[in-house]
Amino acid sequence: MSNNTETESRKLLGRLREAMAGDDAGQARLDKITALIADSMKTEVCSIYLFRDEETLELCATEGLNRESVHQTRMRVGEGLVGRVARRGVVINTADAPNARGFRYMPETGEERYSSFLGIPIQRLGEMLGVLVVQSKDSRDYSADAIYALEVVAMVIAEMTELGAFVGEGAALSPLHKQSVLLKGGVAQEGATEGHIWLHEPRVVVTNPFAEDPDRERERLQEAVDELRVGVDKMLAQSQNGDAEQLQVLEAYRMFANSKSWMRRMEEDIARGLSAEAAVEKEQSLARSRMAQSQDNYLRERLADLDDLSNRLLRILTGQGSETGAEMPDDPVLVARNIGPAELLDYGRKLKGIILSEGSVGSHAAIVARALAIPLLVHVGKITTEALNGDHVLVDGDQGVVHLRPDDTVISAFRDKIAMQAQAKERYTSIREKPAITVDGEQLQLMMNAGLMADLPSLETSGAEGVGLFRTELQFLVRNQMPKRGELVASYARVLAAAKGKEVIFRTLDIGSDKVLPYMTPADEPNPALGWRAIRVGLDKPGVMRMQLQALIRAAEGRPLSIMFPFIAQFEEYRQARSEVDKTLDRERKLGHVLPKTLKVGAMLETPSLGFAPLKFFEEVDFLSIGGNDLKQFFFAADRENERVRSRYDTLNISFLSFIERVVERCEISGTPLSFCGEDAGRPVEAVCLAAMGIRRLSMRPASIGPVKSLMMRVNLTDLRKIVADARHRGEQSVRPAVMDYLREI
């Protein structure tokens, strides 16, 4: 690139800085920017389109188009050339716009007179804010230098939008990070809470995107990169004794930190007028954009490394982030892209809530959040870019909604909701010691799910009659290496002692799918939920299963013991697993260890296939537990992590309830104890319908026992059975409407 072009680029940014520095209101600033870009680029038209909402772009300023169309012309994402730039996040450069694919004629703007079109996405770290457009009457392709110069300008506009530079009378936007925002996500742990944001990875705000002294900015960048490289070398030195895979990752990390092309691109950005911070962020945005479009997992991982290095470099340059010594608020609501179970346990119960922009409802972080009874929302897309440390936030973990920087009306309504929940909790406490007996005299057993010692006090406070599911994988997931047998013995013994004689059903290791051990190489599977997981891993790698069975038998110390195998899909798998139990018992007897007083060995029914197993299976198994979460996704072929499809299928669907009824009938014939475990067991309406189908034992999170028992004591299961039968006879898809009518009348 010629020095002359670099000077022109710096000149344009210099004029842009002057436009930003004035006291003009937001709209006046935008108008100035479009005018000076059109003048500098020698084009007839320059327009800025900004997002009004997630799907709508609005013309917010223009030089050359009809001024009356400003704030009137709107388009959907994907509509017209501007909408295509916004959707794909890529540059569109055409010399013949009216004949280009996707062109949309907007008569109110008069744009049909212009042949050439150049559209540049206005984005910040992968977040689309709008589109910058230049157009000219003459038919021309804009040069690579012109495109680059406008990309730099678009990035500056994004930064200034972030800082609220366009706020004021007639403003196009409210200031980011100041307005109230409502965000939606998936519920991984229910509950409502109020607090202040604590960012797991503090984001950096670039306050000055302009370089007043390019030479000084280059020096600052070099000093920061030198500091970054020293830090990466230290990390490598400290990990020399780590495993080969970890070292390989860090070596790739160091390679990026020493990348000459990365450094050269940032220096070129500075030469064109950007500050060191803005140059780093421009390259980071480019990496994020490529990451979003890449289907190559290896490339995505490498781009993620570059993204992380950029964050570290920005923190060094700005002094923002963890180095600032920011203090965690007294009522922290944690915000992160994703978080592991060990990191979450480090925070412990001090967290009031957790909001993840990624995450999953079945992840081990979600399991830890449930164990700690902390409301958790996942897939809250823009939370990491919208939230800043200390922002006031309301988390509605029942509706899957986040109110960030809420106004007084929302706060008042939310606090009323929390007060009502507190009153209901008092009501549940009053029935805690009472049995769950329905109006027609049917008694149910309500158990709780657990996975940590921290759960066990809930046995008394919730009124649970035992632990219907103890997830043993958490002790494996929160470590960096395989736990020793002695550690497992001590852990399981503490659980049994804390239960004080109440039954605890230990589920053997359920790993695979979304629960991969940190020290186990994940299997590269196209569909891990249907892949090598749970009992399939246990039977193929019996060493870990045997160690766990030994630990459970020794931990019982002569007390009754209940063990359950997960994800049994066919009779033979249960027989093989049961055979391992018998062999382990025999070995323990020969070694002189005390055997459990009684031993019950059960299976989880999580696949429809097991419901059709031979009757001999039902006769041999000591007990059966329906794993509702997995069963439902396989029954309906609807991934429970996919919001588009999972919400289409109702637990109270007649087909699903009929399948449950069939399993109940087979268990009654064979005399097999049956329970239902999963999210639906803890939802009062679903729970009473499952009871109506004949299930008499339900296992749920401790906080759900009160609400479920309260409704159970008010219903007549005979009436509910008739409602289900009538809905089935009428050919209805779901029994929910009829059940809700009944419940409103009781």
Image (cartoon, rainbow, N blue to C red):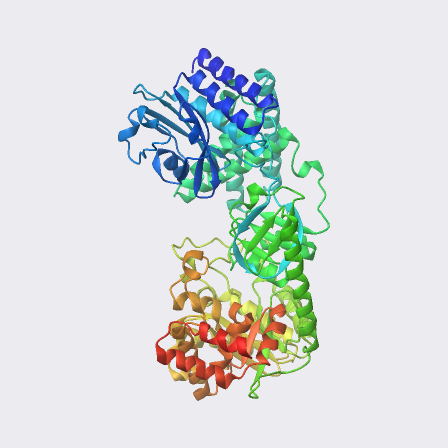
Residue closer to the observer: 302 or 466: 466
Residue extending farthest front: 68
Please tell me how many numbered marks the rendered image carries: 0
Residue closer to the observer: 122 or 476: 122
- Residue drawn where x is 56% and y is 29% of the image: 26
For residue 383, above or below residue 510:
above
The quadrant of the rendering that contains the N terminus is top left
Residue 493: percent from left, percent from top: 66, 71
Residue 649: percent from left, percent from top: 41, 65
Q: Is residue 230 left or right of residue 669?
A: right
For residue 182, above or below residue 96:
below
- Residue drawn where x is 54% and y is 32% of the image: 170
Residue extending farthest top: 4
Residue 456: percent from left, percent from top: 67, 69
Q: Is residue 633 left or right of residue 194?
A: left
Residue 174 visible in this rendered orientation of the protein = yes
For residue 548, above or below residue 476:
below
